[in-house]
Image (cartoon, rainbow, N blue to C red):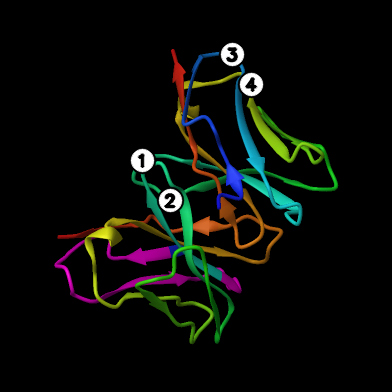
Amino acid sequence: NAGVTQTPKFQVLKTGQSMTLQCAQDMNHEYMSWYRQDPGMGLRLIHYSVGAGITDQGEVPNGYNVSRSTTEDFPLRLLSAAPSQTSVYFCATTRDEYTEAFFGQGTRLTVV
Amino acid sequence: DQQVKQNSPSLSVQEGRISILNCDYTNSMFDYFLWYKKYPAEGPTFLISISSIKDKNEDGRFTVFLNKSAKHLSLHIVPSQPGDSAVYFCAANEKLTFGTGTRLTIIP
């Protein structure tokens, strides 16, 4: 039982490149979210999904795209990487709004 | 606009004493609050939660207090142990909105 799996763990991109951060969960949870963590800023919500086929924007959605075609997977796409997107990214899943979220180990992304 | 605020970026406490971490929120629609603990290079892990219909929830050494009129919650850890050294985030359930975190250091 892996819980929430994020890949890759580390990534270096050049400005303008695109990539997809993967998130997979085996907990059969409906809710999935992407956060970025920056020093002094806490965890800021990028995009979230309350079920397959349903996504919505969070606090900092610009430059990122998501889709949710299955319950298990919630990939985060960087369309054209910028240095401001250098951050640690976390994927999380939760059963509903009244239970705890489970987080992946994070992806450390550096854009040069 | 930060809806969940942790105004103390860091806190140092002697081992064995009580650690008190504070959190304020602005959105009165929040009705469920959670505390998470985060070690370096790991994802946050759930610690304790509280519903807005309660004013206290206890789990072992951890107690969370909620003051709805003041829109304030606090996490008490007693006694504090060296393994408690971590960054603590409070969160509210709407879109799981997080505070900025407090780094707790327990001094042996």
Which numbered dot is residue B17? 3
Q: Residues within 10 Å of mark 1 (few under 14, many from 20)?
A: few
Q: Is label 3 in contact with label 2 (beta carbons under 8 Å)?
A: no
Pointer 4 or 3: first along the chain: 3
Q: CA distance from mark 1 to mark 3?
A: 24 Å
Q: Is label 4 in contact with label 3 (beta carbons under 8 Å)?
A: yes
Q: Residues within 10 Å of mark 2 (few under 14, many from 20)?
A: many
Q: CA distance from mark 4 to mark 3?
A: 6 Å
Question: Which chain is indicated by disc 2?
Answer: B
Pointer 1 or 3: first along the chain: 3
User: Is residue A27 one of those drawn in magenta?
Assistant: yes
For the view shown, which residue lies furthest in the front direction? Answer: B1
Question: Regarding mark 1 in the picture, which secondary structure is present there?
Answer: loop
User: Is residue A16 one of those drawn in magenta?
Assistant: yes
| Residue A2 appearing in the image | no
In the image shown, does B3 or A37 lie closer to the viewer? B3
The residue tagged 4 is: B78
Name which residue type carries label 1: Pro
| Residue B26 appearing in the image | yes
The residue tagged 1 is: B40
Quarter residue A104 falls in: bottom left
A7 is higher (above) or lower (below) than B100:
below
Q: Is residue A62 left or right of residue B33?
A: left
Pointer 4 or 2: first along the chain: 2
Q: Is label 4 in contact with label 1 (beta carbons under 8 Å)?
A: no
**Residue B63 location (% of width, % of height):** 70, 31
The residue tagged 2 is: B43
Q: CA distance from mark 2 to mark 1?
A: 8 Å
